[in-house]
Image: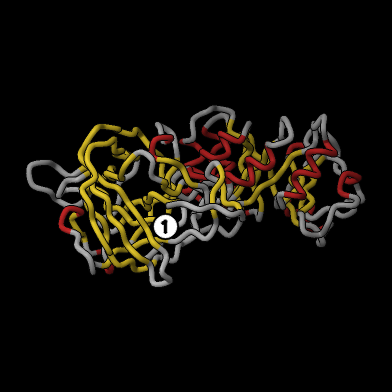
């Protein structure tokens, strides 16, 4: 989980933004007025950022002060006078000299608040690399939630946190959602094949992602939202065709797959820019981006299986030998060679679904 700072200094809807931010459990509220921290719960950090104003003598309930050295003095000098508060430094990066200042700050101070004037993320990459062994935290200013998502993923590590000044209610929620860069592991189960049936022609979807899958990774797909089978990516050699390590020949277009934040999507809904969850044979997950989806008419095969708890699972795939699913231990199984008694890897989501969201309601799928 990355850090989320909400800047309310210039907010026209401060009360509503604060209420949303506290509800979303953001990590810090940023203001230039100590009075704004009154009444805030101890679960949220109070960050004073008096940019363009003087530093008050009484810091009140402030936890962290971000200073502009040219206006307020050096953080270490101020920290000596206020040992009860942490001090950090603000750096605006606009040229090589200020980039060097940002790298130095990242290695010296517990908090560095960074604003990059240019849209390129190369300077941020340099600071992240320069501070790889530092113990302080980098907080980068984002103009919107979309940029926050990018900042969290820069150089695979991302900034330790993002500060955002919400333009409207909903932005704090988006920031908190963007900060969740780790995808939780899933508990996979072993399914026993009970039947396979050639079901004729239909449309199937190949999901082409912007990511190299590992040989033990694929995506979960199923005809029903509460039972899915782990489909193999095309990372393994095949006769007559090259490997396509970004692709999963996933199944018929009505099928469900896991996207992100516990949501499901139909394969037919996916498009360039959509998110799906890559899953390996141990249940470890990561969210990947869809580059395109290829939907074509092909012969289809239906695979029925049963979970240890008796729950039935179905998956309809392209009826072709090169389309494969995972068995225990990462065993790669050709769909057309499956037979009753074979064991597959799958996942049993607990909740029913309404427009992809988990919901506790009666729902019968068959």
Residue 149 located left or right of residue 227: right
Residue 268 located left or right of residue 111: left
Residue 322 located left or right of residue 328: left
**x then y, percent, for residue 342:** 23, 67
Q: Label 1 crowding class (10 Å Cα cut-off): few <14, some 14-19, many 20+?
A: many
Q: Is residue 325 above or below residue 354?
A: below
**x then y, percent, for residue 241:** 11, 41
Q: Is residue 70 above or below residue 264?
A: above
Residue 72 visible in the displayed image: no
Q: Residue at x 40, y 31 (%)?
A: 272
Q: Residue at x 82, y 61 (%)?
A: 84
Q: Residue at x 67, y 42 (%)?
A: 173
Q: Residue at x 58, y 42 (%)?
A: 102
Towards the viewer: 289 or 8? 289
**x then y, percent, for residue 154:** 47, 43
User: What residue sits right under mark 1 in the picture?
Assistant: 227
Task: Check the image and tell me how it is coloured.
Answer: secondary structure
**x then y, percent, for residue 259:** 46, 46
Towards the viewer: 289 or 325? 325
Residue 63 located left or right of residue 323: right
């Amino acid at each position: 989980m990355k850090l989320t700072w909400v800047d309310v200094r210039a907010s026209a809807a401060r009360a509503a933004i604060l209420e949303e931010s506290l509800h979303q459990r953001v990590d810090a509220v940023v203001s230039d007025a100590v009075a704004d921290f009154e009444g805030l719960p101890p679960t949220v950090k109070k960050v004073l950022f008096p940019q363009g104003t003087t530093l008050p003598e009484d810091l009140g309930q402030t936890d962290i002060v971000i200073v502009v050295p040219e206006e307020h003095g050096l953080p270490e000098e101020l920290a000596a006078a206020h040992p009860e508060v942490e001090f950090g430094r603000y750096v605006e990066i606009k040229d090589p000299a200020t980039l060097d200042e940002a790298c130095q700050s990242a290695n010296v101070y517990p908090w560095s608040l960074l604003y990059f004037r240019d849209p390129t993320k190369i300077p941020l990459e340099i600071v992240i690399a320069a501070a790889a062994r530092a113990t302080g935290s980098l907080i980068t200013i984002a103009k919107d939630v979309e940029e926050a998502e990018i900042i969290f993923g820069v150089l695979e590590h991302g900034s330790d946190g993002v500060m955002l000044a919400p333009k409207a209610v909903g932005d704090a929620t988006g920031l908190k959602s963007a900060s969740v860069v780790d995808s939780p592991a899933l508990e996979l189960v072993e399914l026993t094949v009970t039947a396979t049936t050639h079901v004729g022609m239909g449309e199937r979807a190949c999901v082409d992602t912007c990511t190299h899958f590992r040989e033990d990774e694929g995506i979960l797909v199923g005809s029903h939202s509460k039972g899915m089978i782990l489909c193999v990516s095309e990372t393994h050699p095949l006769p007559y065709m090259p490997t396509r390590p970004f692709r999963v020949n996933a199944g018929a277009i009505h099928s469900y797959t896991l996207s992100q934040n516990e949501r499901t999507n139909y394969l037919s809904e996916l498009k360039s820019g959509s998110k799906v969850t890559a899953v390996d044979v141990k249940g470890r997950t990561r969210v990947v981006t869809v580059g395109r989806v290829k939907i074509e008419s092909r012969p289809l095969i239906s695979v029925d299986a049963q979970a240890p708890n008796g729950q039935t699972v179905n998956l309809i795939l392209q009826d072709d030998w090169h389309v494969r699913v995972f068995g225990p231990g990462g065993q790669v199984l050709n769909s057309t060679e499956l037979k009753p008694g074979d064991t597959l890897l799958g996942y049993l989501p607990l909740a029913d679904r309404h427009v992809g969201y988990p919901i506790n309601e009666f729902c019968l799928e068959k």
